[in-house]
Amino acid sequence: MNKKLKKKDYSGEKKIIDNSLEEKLKSLKRMAHLLDDCIKVPGTDWKIGVDGIVGLIPVIGDITTGCFSAYIIYQARNFNIPKKTLLKMIWNASLDIGIGFIPILGDQFDLYWKANLANVNLLIAHVENEIADHKRDDSFS
């Protein structure tokens, strides 16, 4: 789950993804990074994000960060994401929110489970597959 977000520019592609969707994808990547791994824990290789910090506030923190996770999933619909992938995204976020409600364990879980990064990576994989499919269709015709 701790995959790095790929830095990829889709602007050179043949308008499979228009400018507004490209900007939305970039925005979602930034949000996931901020939520899950923007702060390096000193003396370790671990990174945490706002999700891990705000999650320290019982109940309210987990609900707040859960809303951001839900927003990422909500925005994925603009990319015509398949239902199977959408369900994976919902599972990732649900697990993050659900375990986050458990004191101490939930906070430790946030060090390992990067649901928002995983969800954005699923979205990126979908976009890249769409681009690859479109290129195959163009080369076939």
Image (spheres, rainbow, N blue to C red):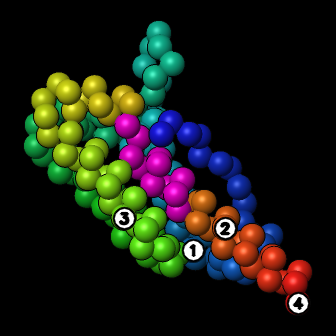
> What residue type is disc 3 on?
Leu
C-alpha separation, residue under disc 4 versus residue under disc 3: 34 Å
Q: Earlier in the sequence, mark 1 or mark 4?
A: 1
The overriding secondary structure of the stretch rendered in magenta is: helix
Q: Nearer the viewer, mark 3 or mark 1?
A: 3
Is residue 68 visible in the rendered image? The answer is: no
Quickly name the residue at label 4. 141
Q: Earlier in the sequence, mark 1 or mark 2?
A: 1
User: In the image, is 76 to the left or to the right of 121?
Assistant: left
C-alpha separation, residue under disc 3 versus residue under disc 1: 21 Å
Q: Secondary structure at mark 3?
A: helix
Q: Earlier in the sequence, mark 3 or mark 2?
A: 3
Q: Residue at x 58, y 76 (%)?
A: 20
> What residue type is disc 1 on?
Leu
Q: Earlier in the sequence, mark 4 or mark 2?
A: 2
Q: Nearer the viewer, mark 1 or mark 2?
A: 2
State the mark number for residue 87: 3
> What residue type is disc 4 on?
Ser
Q: Secondary structure at mark 1?
A: helix
Q: Position of residue 43 (x, y in %)?
A: 47, 9
Q: Secondary structure at mark 2?
A: helix
User: In the image, is 70 to the left or to the right of 61?
Assistant: right
C-alpha separation, residue under disc 1 versus residue under disc 4: 26 Å
Q: Is residue 24 magenta?
A: no
On the rendered image, what quadrant is the C terminus found in?
bottom right
Quickly name the residue at label 2. 129
Q: Is residue 122 magenta?
A: yes
Quickly name the residue at label 1. 21
Q: Is residue 23 above or below residue 35?
A: below
Q: Which residues are magenta?
A: 113-123
Q: Are marks 1 and 4 in contact (CB under 8 Å)?
A: no
Is residue 122 visible in the rendered image? The answer is: yes
